[in-house]
Image: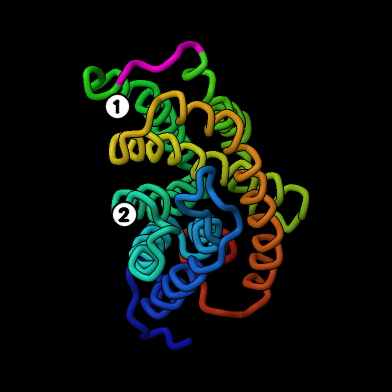
Amino acid sequence: MSKAQATVFGVPISWIAMIAAILGGSSIIPIFYFYGGAGYMSLGYALCPLMGLVLGPYGGFIAGLIGGLIAWIIMPPAVLGGPVTVILDWAMVPLIVGLIVNRKWHIAVVLQIIAFIFYNLFPFYIPGPPTFANPPQPFYALSGYWYYIGLPLLVATGRKIPEWIRSGDKKKVALSLIVLEWASNEAMECWGWSWYAYLFGLPAAFVATVSAFAVPPQRIIALIVIIAIGIPLLEGLKKSGLRRIPGTAWSE
């Protein structure tokens, strides 16, 4: 790779374009159909956390943003919620992952706490009635338990993740990938659920039921995909001899 190649935040533009195309193109591959049949979780979406490791936080954000827009255009059922979903679930996720592996995990903690508050208030309390009925409590608050687990995981391991993800120890890398996925994708889904409820007029009981019972198996599949692809991908990049990219998990 030429050292004179144009870059953005130290990431070659060609890499960003290639990975954005991969994310967008793989949106046609479903790995989990959503409850009710409105859409599905795609392979491209599941791969987004890895982009923060491969391209760094800012390169990953740009690639996720472009890839999500491509996915929204070619396969709308894979990007329910349109551009807002692109920003939350496709662009912010690699940004958060990249920040954590660059020792800025406290930013992810703040974003998670805000996301949990948002999930519990919008739109059923704010703006609330008469458009949206108040949710059944405590079921609604407890329904986000799967998302909430990511916060203590991140607090307990955040300081170690930058070391573990670069260690080459497969067990440590796998654990890091689990925490990174949970601390990024899961928190952003809290924002996403609030947006879906507002956009589609979803009842609070429906959101709570899906969050409590349908989300965990969906997220477990995403975790399996991340581990199965992430470990060999990082190992391959470390051995590739490719130009090093600052802020990534494989070049430092």
> Residue 18's image quarter?
bottom left
Nearest to N terminus: mark 1 or mark 2? 2
Res 233 visible: yes
Residue that mark 2 sits on: 82
Question: Could you say where residue 82 lies in the image, as x and y percent from the top left?
Answer: 31, 54
Look at the numbered disc 2 and give the secondary structure of its residue.
loop
Residue that mark 1 sits on: 123
| Near-viewer residue (85 or 202) | 202
Q: CA distance from mark 1 to mark 2?
A: 18 Å
Question: Could you say where residue 100 lies in the image, as x and y percent from the top left?
Answer: 50, 45
Q: Is residue 59 above or below residue 39?
A: below
Look at the numbered disc 1 and give the secondary structure of its residue.
loop
Question: Could you say where residue 205 lies in the image, as x and y percent from the top left?
Answer: 45, 24
> Which residue corresponds to the image point at 33% horizontal and 64% vertical from the top-left?
69
Q: Which residues are magenta?
A: 133-138
Determine whether, in the image, residue 91 is placed left or right of residue 129. right
